[in-house]
Image: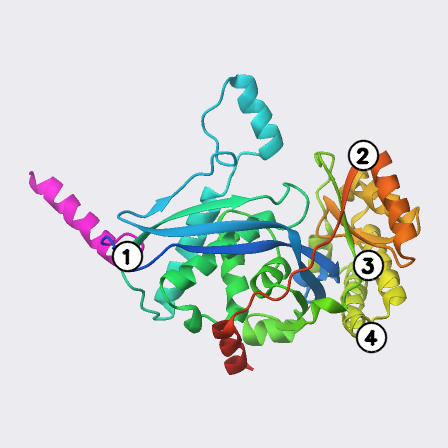
Amino acid sequence: MSRKDSTASGVLKRYLLDCTYVSYQMNSAEAGVIEHKAYARVGLLGNPSDVYFGKTISFSLGNFWASVKLEPSHNLVIKPHPTHDLVEFNSLDHLVSRLQSEGYYGGVRLLMAICKVFYKHCKENEINLQQGNFTLSYDTNIPRQTGLSGSSAIVCAALSCLLDFYKVRHLIKVEVRPNLILNAEKELGIVAGLQDRVAQVYGGLVHMDFSKENMDKLGHGIYTPMDISLLPPLHLIYAENPSDSGKVHSTVRQRWLNGDEFIISSMAEVANIAAEGQNVILEKNYQKLAELMNCNFDLRRSMFGDECLGDLNIEMVEVARRVGAASKFTGSGGAVVAFCPDGPSQVKLLEDACQKAGFIIQPIQLVPSCLNEVDLQTLSESN
């Protein structure tokens, strides 16, 4: 071996020794397979004020989820999904059709990003990680481009696997984990707020306060789990082909940064909806809940404009409202959460209207909080 080769080998060796997730083989008998789910998310009230120091209420959507499996292995392997990370095609037409429906990116980059962010966080906070490699794989049934937080669900599930594999769940506070998930997505240029990640880390129904004081002082918001059984029956509406979403880039963020009084006051109103909604839900005042849902969307529409929201997205809201149901986006568009305050007869009208309009509608399945005893311990210690 030449001196040059020897030097290069030494540099590589030092890098591998320093990098936690490229280390020696772990016997699979010493650590078993770890698998976690993270559910899709519905923003019920207050969105999109989470990125404007506002307040929101969100909950886990049991209808759809992402799962990540971690298996001890000789080398660290990020396993491509056979559908979402497809790199072999029958023809050029097949490739183009796949890109049009699924986009350019699958979940591999998300898994790699959270590994990097997790490793960096542990190193910066002097959290020692055991040696050992693993294979990460994922699956998801969350419909694409529906505003249900499919990407962050994959990252959230992967983070849970890493916490358990390295046995550091008790060392990384629950409140901090949404920041790690968001940072991983920022690595990839994904622009988003903390709301979705909080909902997926905590599970169940959560009220979130992102006031500037809290964010500056704590680095995260104040997150209050609520009893998800307080919610009335809700429905999810989405389009099978959501390609006709808004095509116009929003200027709301820049206007807010520029001190636009209309945007600032409107966003404050949106946040107040979530603040009021917390009491409304606790009191089971469902008629008022319907009013708040409608008001939330109307404020969003007045700020962003119809061109930005997109005709298809607006029609999903309107099809529900035409039968008297309350409706609003679950996120930034692509799907709608609807509530029929008048009961089963109104639900039937909504189902018929959605079928006629070509939308998919299904009852929302609620899931309880996913926090375990260790997670709850980290919460009690931080409060």
Task: Decide: few, some or many residues near mark 4? Use Cα within 10 Å; few <14, some 14-19, many ≥20.
Answer: few
Secondary structure of residue under mark 4: loop
State yes or no: discs 4 and 3 in contact (Cβ < 8 Å).
no
Alpha-carbon span between mark 1 and mark 3: 52 Å
Secondary structure of residue under mark 3: helix
Kind of residue at badge 3: Asn
Residue 283 numbered mark, or none:
4
Of residue 333 and residue 192, the one placed in the foreground of this image is 333
Q: Which residues are magenta?
A: 1-23
User: Does the stretch in magenta take in 72?
Assistant: no
Mark 1, residue position? 29
Q: Quadrant of the N terminus?
A: top left
Alpha-carbon span between mark 3 and mark 2: 25 Å
Which one is in front in this view, the residue at disc 1 or the one at disc 3?
A: 1
Q: Picture coordinates of residue 65 (x, y %)?
A: 59, 50
Mark 3, residue position? 296
Disc nearer the start of the sequence (1/2) = 1
Kind of residue at badge 4: Glu
Can residue 112 be seen by looking at this rendering?
yes
Of residue 139 and residue 310, the one placed in the foreground of this image is 139
State yes or no: discs 3 and 2 in contact (Cβ < 8 Å).
no
Q: Residue at x 51, y 50 (%)?
A: 67
Kind of residue at badge 2: Gly
